[in-house]
Amino acid sequence: MIPLWIKVACTLFFCVLVPVNWRQYGLANFLWFSDIALMLLVPALWLEDRLLTSMAALAVLLPELAWNLDFLLRLLTGHSGIGLSSYMFDPHIAVAIRSVSLFHAWLPPLLVWMLYRMGYDDRALAWQTMLAIVVVPLSYLFSDPKTNVNWVYGLGDKPQSMIPQPAFVLLMIAAFPTLIYLPTHLLLRKLLPYAH
C-alpha cells in the first residue's frame, strides 16, 4: 500500500534527524510527541501498521496544525503567533539544523494519507494515552524549564507558578488525552476509513 520510495525517504530522513537533533538539543528532545510520532512513522511505514500510524496521528495532528499556522503566520507577517515555531527563526541556530524541523510540515499530511489508505485503528486512543502517561513524567524528569518538553513546566516560555509542579504534570497527563487525542480520535473515526 505504501510506495517503497516513501519508506526509504522517511527512513533516511530519520537517520539524519537523530544525530543532528541529538547533538543540537540533547536526548530529552526526543521525548517531544512530534519526535515520538516520527519514530513511530518508520516502523509504521515498513510494516504498514494501522495502529502505529493512528497513534502518531492522534499525538500530532492538532499540535502540528498549530505549529504550521504559527510558522506560516511568522513567514507571511514577520510576527509570531503563539510561539511554537519561534526557534525556526532563531539566527543562533544554524539553518541546516532548523531545516530538519520542517518535518512538522509534511508529517501530518503523510499520516492522514497513510490512514486514508490503511484505515484508522480506534485502539490508538488507548495506546497513545498509555504512552502519554509514561512520556509526560519522563519529560518532566529529563527536560528542564528552558526546553519545556511537552509543556510540562507551563504553556508558555516561562514556567508556570500557579499550582505545584507535580500537580501541573498530572494536569498535563490528563490534558493530552482529553484535549488533543480524544477530539482527533473522534474526527478521524468520522472522516477516515475505519479498521478495528
Image (tube, rainbow, N blue to C red):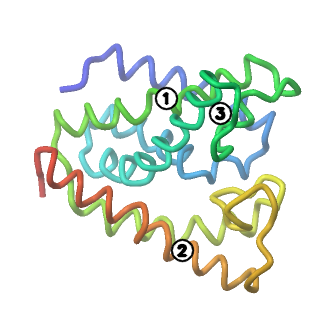
Instruction: Give the vertical position of 121 relative to 99 (above or below).
Output: below
Left or right relative to 139: residue 58: left
Residue at 73% over, 85% down: 163
Give SS at disc 1: helix
Q: Position of residue 77 (x, y in %)?
A: 64, 25
Is residue 188 or residue 29 the one in the foreground?
188
Q: Position of residue 59 (x, y in %)?
A: 43, 53
Tag nearer the camera, 2 or 1: 1
Going from the N terminus, do you reach mark 2 or mark 3 first?
3
- Residue at label 3? 18
Say the numbered circle drawn on residue 173.
Answer: 2
Residue type, mark 1 in image: Ala
Residue at 63% over, 41% down: 81
Going from the N terminus, do you reach mark 2 or mark 1 first?
1
Is residue 49 or residue 144 the one in the foreground?
144
Q: Position of residue 62 (x, y in %)?
A: 43, 49
